[in-house]
Image (cartoon, rainbow, N blue to C red):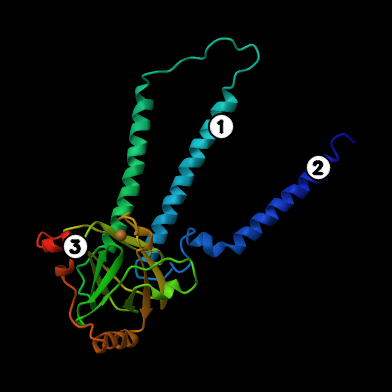
Amino acid sequence: MSTSPHRPRRKVVVAALAAVTALGLSGCSDIVQRGFLPEQAPGATNHTDTVISLWNNAWIAALAVGVLVWGLLLWCIVVYRKRKGDNELPVQLRYHVPLELMYTFVPIVMIGVLFAFTSRSMGEIVDTSAEPDVHIEVVGKRWSWDFNYTDADVHYSGTQVVLTGQEGVAETLPTLYLPQGENVEISLRTRDVNHAFWVPGFLMKLDMIAGRTNAFQIVPQELGTFEGKCAELCGEYHASMLFNVEVVTPEEFEEKMAEYREAGNTGLLGPEYDTDQANVPSEEGEG
Ligand SMILES: [Cu+2]
């Protein structure tokens, strides 16, 4: 009579927990599989699977280390707890060379493994040795973006968006067009301070450093609209430095290029529009 009321309750609790866990795992297995990364990410580009597996495996390794450390901690706390009548200090260990060597080298090995896998993936992403099908230059500027479509010799010049919080602002953002299935080399530069090119759905970002050009190649695989943003605090309206990426078919891409040409957006926007150059006319500063 004394123990029986507890058992059924415990069984119910265990069953309920199991059901919730199973439901949670089945309901969000996609989310778990992509490591809680953006919904568009899997298959979005030729690099996203690499990034997802690096991310997931790093978490699995971290969790394994965590479980081991938590387990050892709990074990020490329970087994070596102070018992009734224990009034003496236990044996104090210090300068235990094998132990110290272990906790120096094991973390070094762990960091080394993480570094090796990360470096391999990053090397793949910023590898620009292949011959690209399309060249695009993305230029960051406070607080918008210019896109030079080098091969088509057309450009798009963005203006800073005003974030009103109203619907429809997203449609007014500067849009970078990318052709699906083609190897696009994107080179990044800035007209002023440091910015960073970030498309969360592509699972990558790359800095735009004043005075240097960074580049990467990407094959967009999924059609659709992706959000882009500046990921380097670059001043007052950094949060407004947004853009859209529109992955379209190669035919639509060519149509878009023709559209720009007809609209008179011919030629590329070069460094003459940079604001941080030594030859900026001095009148500008006085105005
Ligand atoms: Cu910026």
Task: Name the residue: 21% across, 63% down.
Answer: 191
Q: Residue 74, labelled with which disc?
A: 1
How many residues crowd mark 3 within 10 Å: few (<14), some (14–19), many (20+)?
few
In this rendering, the answer to whether 209 lies above or below 242 is above
Query: Which tag, 3 or 1, sits closer to the chain's start?
Result: 1
Circles 2 and 1: CB atoms closer than 8 Å: no
Please give the name of the residue rendered at 81% of the width and 42% of the height, measured from the top-left corner. Answer: 7
Q: Residue 287, labelled with which disc?
A: 3
Report, in whole angstroms, how far the alpha carbon at label 3 lies from the one at label 1. 68 Å
Indicate the quadrant containing the C terminus: top left, top right, bottom left or bottom right.
bottom left
The residue at label 1 has a CB less than 8 Å from ligand 1: no
Query: Is any atom of residue 212 visible in this view?
Result: no
Secondary element under disc 1, as helix, strand or loop, is: helix
For residue 47, what is the image quadrant?
Answer: bottom left
Q: Specify the label residue 7 is tagged with.
A: 2
- In the displayed structure image, the side of residue 260 where residue 68 appears, left or right: right
- Dot 2 or dot 3: first in sequence order is 2
Secondary structure of the residue carrying numbered label 3 = loop
Residues 187 and 243: in front is 243
Is residue 227 depicted above or below 235 in this figure? below
For the residues carrying marks 2 and 3, which lies nearer the camera in this image?
3
**Quarter-of-image position of residue 158:** bottom left
Rendered location of residue 38, percent (x, y): 46, 64
Q: Which residue sits furthest right?
A: 1
Q: CA distance from mark 2 to mark 3?
A: 82 Å
Task: Determine whether label 3 and label 1 are within 8 Å by CB.
Answer: no
Q: Is residue 196 above or below residue 84?
A: below
On the image, the x and y values in percent for residue 177 come to 32, 77
